[in-house]
Image (spheres, coloured by chain):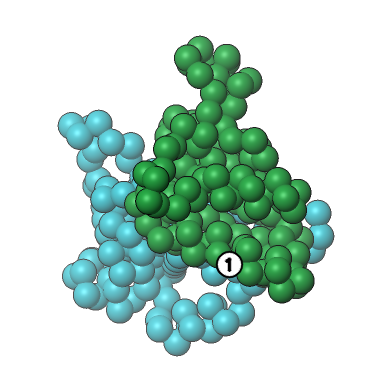
Chain colours: A cyan, B green
Amino acid sequence: MSAPQSYLILARSSPYGSNMPKAALDIALTAAAFEQEVAVVFLDDGVLQLLPNQDTESSGLKNGSKMISALKVYEVQHVYIHLPSAEKSELDLSKVPDEIEAITDELLQDLVSKSDHVMVF
Amino acid sequence: MKFTLVINGAPWSSPSARTALKFAETALSSGHEIYRLFFYQDGTGNASGYCVAPQDEEDIPARWEALITKHDIDAVVCAASAHKRGILDYAESERYERDGANLRPGFTVSGLGQFIDAATQSDRVVSFVT
């Protein structure tokens, strides 16, 4: 395959309202497996995917947060939380896993303009 | 220009599929090339041969099939997305012991790797979100 390209995955859906969160992670992991440069940004309702202590046992749903914490292990280079979205959702950043970096509007704009592919889920 | 289209919407529930179809028809008639159509998520519904459109409505899956066959376009359906929505080719229908196969002619079932390949090879990837 040719030179790696950069993928920016914007995960903006709430965690259990649709299968968009899973679709976002599947694309991110596949791109990383094919040695592409991948960044995932959780924004808008998507920041709720990062809520700590998600318990899906009684609902029978698949817990997406475990896959999110494994993104870096599978060579997804950057995982970000969009700061203004986190503030709007009153998400306590200290409870978000350490490997997740914070990103401002300005840095996000920069990332969007520099990425070869921007995909919204 | 060489395009890849990602179709995420089912023909019966969102304008995404129809918009993508029109885009594909227009791109080809304007002299552009389509490297691949990638049907993902609910978009895999476009590959179902079991959909019956009401007489006074457009048959979007049939139009896809016609376009794909006429121009010999590579049309890939994401396997994981298709299977859970009941879209199977003959081999998978046998493998999972289902009563019938409904993948339309012209479409192939494959994985997300085909999307990454398409993104690498194309000048533009255009996603039609639901």
Decide: is B92 above or below A72.
above
Left or right: residue A22 versus residue B73 is left
Q: Is residue A11 left or right of residue A5?
A: left
Q: Position of residue B96 (x, y in %)?
A: 52, 16
Residue furthest bottom as drawn: A106
Query: Disc 1 on helix, strand or loop?
Result: helix
Q: Is residue A24 visible?
A: no
Residue A37 position in % (x across, y down): 64, 63
Q: Quadrant of the N terminus of chain A?
A: bottom right
A46 relative to B88 in the view: left or right: left
Q: Position of residue A70 (x, y in %)?
A: 48, 47
The quarter of the picture where residue A46 lies is bottom left
The chain ID associated with circle 1 is B
Quarter assignment of residue B4: bottom right
Who's the residue at 35% across and 69% down the image?
A43
**Residue B103 drawn at (x, y percent):** 57, 32
Q: Residue at x 74, y 70 (%)?
A: B32
Query: Which residue is situated farthest in the front direction here?
Result: B55
Q: Residue at x 28, y 36 (%)?
A: A61
Return the residue at label 1. Answer: B23
Q: Residue furthest right?
A: A2
The image shows residue B4, relative to residue A68, as above or below, that is: below
Amino acid on which disc 1 is placed: Phe
Could you say which is closer to the camera, residue A96 or residue B13?
B13
Report the quarter where the C terminus of chain A lies. bottom left
Q: Nearer the viewer, residue A46 or B60?
A: B60
Say if residue B3 shows up in the picture.
yes
Q: Residue at x 33, y 37 (%)?
A: A62
Q: Residues within 10 Å of mark 1 (few under 14, many from 20)?
A: some
Q: Which quadrant would residue A98 be assigned to in this image?
A: bottom left
